[in-house]
Amino acid sequence: GENVEQHPSTLSVQEGDSAVIKCTYSDSASNYFPWYKQELGKRPQLIIDIRSNVGEKKDQRIAVTLNKTAKHFSLHITETQPEDSAVYFCAASASGGSYIPTFGRGTSLIVHP
Amino acid sequence: EPEVTQTPSHQVTQMGQEVILRCVPISNHLYFYWYRQILGQKVEFLVSFYNNEISEKSEIFDDQFSVERPDGSNFTLKIRSTKLEDSAMYFCASSDPLGTDTQYFGPGTRLTVL
């Protein structure tokens, strides 16, 4: 089955800095890669996703890159703000029908004001 | 914007008791899922459900678990004889594969087994 590794487990940055979270996956059939943000005690919220037919996607301060050859994808947050502090999970799955995402272990991002 | 809802938000039960966790998926979605998240750990897939039957299930989803869609709106997870290690946050999610594979999560039910 799919195996998703996520690094780092904790990331501490100063407000305004950039943050990068990296994930690798093992199953070459995976073609859908969502990123979720989970604030303490809250539900995981989809913040951005990317499919294997593109290499990069951007939404304001958030961007995701995908390298299919190397089987890794990354989340980039620019100009971080304290409200970006949360746990971020990457996931990988094969899309279509009842796809089952495999989640990474999460990265706790702390943005210091 | 429509959201997945779950009840109760917190359930406390004694070991060995049965619990039913309830979810109302987004109305036009066709696939439904249950996940669990033990405190401080990653989200783990339990089961997916489509067309009134289980599509896939993980090793975690053993005989003590069952799911049901008793009517056109609710989706339930039953844990027959709870164990201490069942204590976790349980999330329901739904998706519409005809439009997008994106899964939308409910707010979760925190299950505490004493």
Image (cartoon, rainbow, N blue to C red):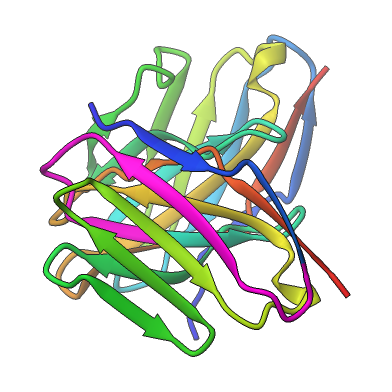
The correct choice, above or below, for A73 with respect to B104 in the image is above
- In the figure, residue B60 lies in which quadrant? top left
Is residue B104 in view from this perspective?
A: no
Residue A96 falls within the magenta-colored stretch: no
> Residue A85, position in %: x, y?
74, 65
Name the spot of residue A18 as percent of width and height, x first: 62, 73
Start-end of magenta stretch: A14-34
Q: Of B54 and A25, which appears nearest the observer? A: A25
Q: In which quarter of the image is the C terminus of chain B?
A: top right
Q: Which residue is drawn at 70% across and 72% down?
A: A84
* Viewer-closest of A72 and B27: A72
User: Is residue A2 in view?
Assistant: yes
Does residue B23 appear to the left or right of B66 in the view shown? right
Q: Is residue B9 left or right of residue B78?
A: right
Q: Is residue B44 above or below residue B86?
A: below
Q: Residue at x 51, y 60 (%)?
A: A36
Q: In this picture, is A83 found above or below A42?
A: below
Say above or below: A105 vs B28: above
Return the residue found at the far right. Answer: A113
Query: Residue visible at 14% across and 50% down?
Result: A69
Instruction: Tell me, yes or no, whether the highlighted magenta stretch contains residue A31.
Output: yes
Residue A25 in picture, x, y percent from top left = 29, 40
Instruction: From the top left corner, tell me how far across and down residue A79 is, in percent.
Output: 65, 83
Asked if residue A76 lies left or right of residue B51, the reply is: right
